[in-house]
Image: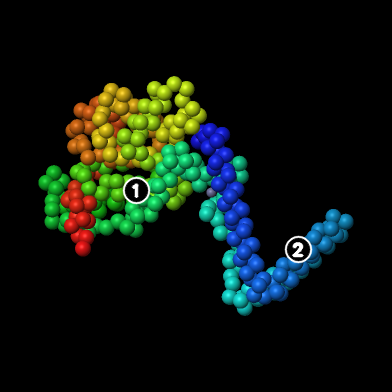
Amino acid sequence: MPLSNSQYDTIIREYNARQIQNQHAKDDRIKEAYGKDQRLKMIDDAISSCSLGQARKLLGGDVTALASLRLMLSDYRKQRLAILDELGYSEQYFEPSYACSDCKDTGYIGNDRCHCFRQRAIDLVYTQSNIRSILNNENFDAFSYDYYSSTEVNPSTGLTSLETIQNAVKACRSFILEFDSSFSNLFFYGDTGVGKTFLSNCVAKELLDTGHSVIYFTAFQLFDILKRNTFQKNADADMLAAHQNIFDCDLLILDDLGTELPNSFTVSQLFLCLNERILRRKSTIISTNLPIHQLAELYSERTFSRISSHYMMLKLFGDDIRIQKKLRQP
Ligand SMILES: [Zn+2]
């Protein structure tokens, strides 16, 4: 993912700060344990000095140094464990606790950027760091079927509101499960407040948690970025990077399509964006309140044809959940 120098520096500074913080926290825990039992410090000191001494011997040609070092270390380790056990500590307590255990908060795995780095770059470029707090509330654990009626039937499918959402959740679950092995896209449509955005967020959370890069946009925000990139002279590196990510990220969520006022620019840009992502086999989730027949009218036949042939179309229906939540409040 392309980043400008200043964006890169910002992220690396955050990683460095986190590493220092981890080290301090680890030192504090060790100090706390030393305070409880002096023998721990003596053993740790002995381990360092015997390692150093044996290394010197090894360098001096003593081939038995390594074997005797191993023996000594194993003995010290046993003593250390026994004391820790007595004090009620586990060995892991003294290990650093990383925000990302995959890269140990370095941002890199070997020479490659870690998934946490890639997502941090997206959050920074799109200033979408608030998405984390939204996803803490909107995820599958918080999902409730209570708002969907088991009696209200959609005449065109013969399914109740509850059965419809159960099918949609099942489709989302397999979308997530097969995300790395098969390319697919989701299209949620239906009236306001039937859970389209909530369901998109559930998927976003699962994929973010498994190290995928996710960008969330309302249609308005997407077109705004595309517009600035196209019409602004001398677009800076940050902006160009932002533009590239729209085609590159693992999942693009395009929420509330149709709430902006479509014009010839947005119509052609939407086609380019969706088409490019299909060509790159990068998944997209679209949600809209528009009835399906209006999609072709507003965004052209060719866009509609791409969506209908590459997206799983999921129509949700029911009563407005936001209104129901308000009604149920004491
Ligand atoms: Zn990482």
Q: Is residue 74 left or right of residue 269?
A: right
Q: Is residue 146 left or right of residue 53?
A: left
Position of residue 22 relative to residue 197, above or below, is below
Image marks 2 and 1: residues in contact by CB distance under 8 Å: no
How many C-alpha atoms fall within 10 Å of the one at disc 2: few (<14), some, or many (≥20)?
A: few
- Name the residue at 38% across, 31% down: 225
- Name the residue at 80% across, 60% down: 52
Residue at mark 2: 48
Q: Is residue 34 visible?
A: yes
- Identity of the residue furthest to the right in this view: 60
Q: Amino acid at mark 1?
A: Asn
Cβ at disc 2 under 8 Å from ligand 1: no
SS at mark 2 in the image = helix
Q: Amino acid at mark 2?
A: Ser
Q: Is residue 207 visible?
A: no
Q: What is the number of the mark on residue 26?
A: none
Q: State the CA–CA distance, disc 2 to disc 1.
A: 50 Å
- Name the residue at 26% across, 28% down: 262
- Name the residue at 54% across, 43% down: 11
Most foreground residue, 89 or 280: 89
* Residue 127 position in % (x across, y down): 43, 41
Q: Is residue 39 left or right of residue 148?
A: right
- Identity of the residue furthest to the left in this view: 155
Disc with the residue nearer the chain's start (2 vs 1): 2
* Residue 100 position in % (x across, y down): 53, 52
**Colour mapping used in the image:** rainbow
* Residue 119 position in % (x across, y down): 47, 44
SS at mark 1 in the image = helix
Residue at mark 1: 201
Most foreground residue, 195 or 281: 195
